[in-house]
Amino acid sequence: MIWLSFAGGLVLSVTPMPEFMQYGRPLWLALLLTYWTLYLPHRVGMTTAWLLGLALDVLGGTLLGQNALVLALVSFLVQLLQPRLRMFHNWQQSLVLLVVLGLAQLVQLWLYVLAGHRPPPTLLFLLPALVSALLWPWLFVILRALRLRLRVG
């Protein structure tokens, strides 16, 4: 179930979208990784994040290791905050995820500029973190129901 959700996240991450929606594309792999790291830390962690990031780099045609580093950072921060995050309500988890994913987007921007690209002139690069934080409560409910129904653990 875990790897099937990650495969779906990879597909959603590279599926073409209209140009105006590209800026707000949710960080599907980061959200899925957050859920599984939060509730099954003994099975999903930084190694999984690194491998998923490398797969996303290959599928997306980005600099090899760029997404791997960002997803490993997300996994590390979620593991660090795991005892607190599990006590929070969904909306509080969303606020924490907004900060974590915002930091991930800043690292992504930094790597993008280091690769020789021109940075975007606005704060539009943070929009995926906001959209992902808004999607978190619904994704949490769906994944929790699947995890309990299929007894993943």
Image (cartoon, rainbow, N blue to C red):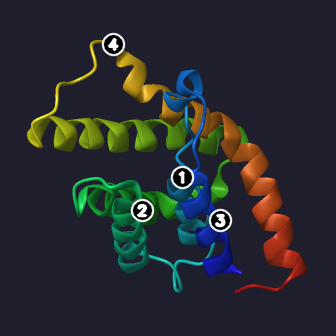
Say which element carries label 2: helix
Determine which of the numbered discs, if any, sits on residue 8 in the image.
3
Which tag is nearer the camera, tag 2 or tag 3? Answer: 2
The crowding category of the residue bearing disc 4, from other C-alpha atoms within 10 Å (few below 14, some 14 to 19, many at least 20), is few
Q: Of callouts 4 and 1, which one flags the residue occurring earlier in the amino acid sequence?
A: 1
Asked if the residues shown at circle 2 and circle 1 are in contact, with their CB atoms under 8 angstroms apart, the answer is yes
Q: Would residue 123 appear left or right of 12 to someone viewing this image?
A: left
Identified by mark 1, the residue type is Ser
Vertical placement of residue 100 versus 147, above or below: above
Image coordinates of residue 96 in percent, x first then y, are 52, 41
Asked if the residues shown at circle 4 and circle 1 are in contact, with their CB atoms under 8 angstroms apart, the answer is no
Q: Which residue is mark 4?
A: 122
Marks 4 and 1 sit apart, C-alpha to C-alpha, by 23 Å
Q: Of callouts 4 and 3, which one flags the residue occurring earlier in the amino acid sequence?
A: 3
Image coordinates of residue 114 in percent, x first then y, are 10, 40
Identified by mark 3, the residue type is Gly
Marks 4 and 3 sit apart, C-alpha to C-alpha, by 30 Å
Q: Which residue is mark 2?
A: 59
- x 43%, y 77%: residue: 48
- Asked if residue 89 can be seen in this view, the reply is no
Q: Residue furthest right?
A: 149
The crowding category of the residue bearing disc 2, from other C-alpha atoms within 10 Å (few below 14, some 14 to 19, many at least 20), is few
Say which element carries label 4: loop
Determine which of the numbered discs, if any, sits on residue 13 in the image.
1
Viewer-side residue, 79 vs 118: 118
The crowding category of the residue bearing disc 3, from other C-alpha atoms within 10 Å (few below 14, some 14 to 19, many at least 20), is few
Q: Of callouts 2 and 3, which one flags the residue occurring earlier in the amino acid sequence?
A: 3
* Residue 74 sits in quarter: bottom left
- x 52%, y 43%: residue: 97
Identified by mark 2, the residue type is Leu
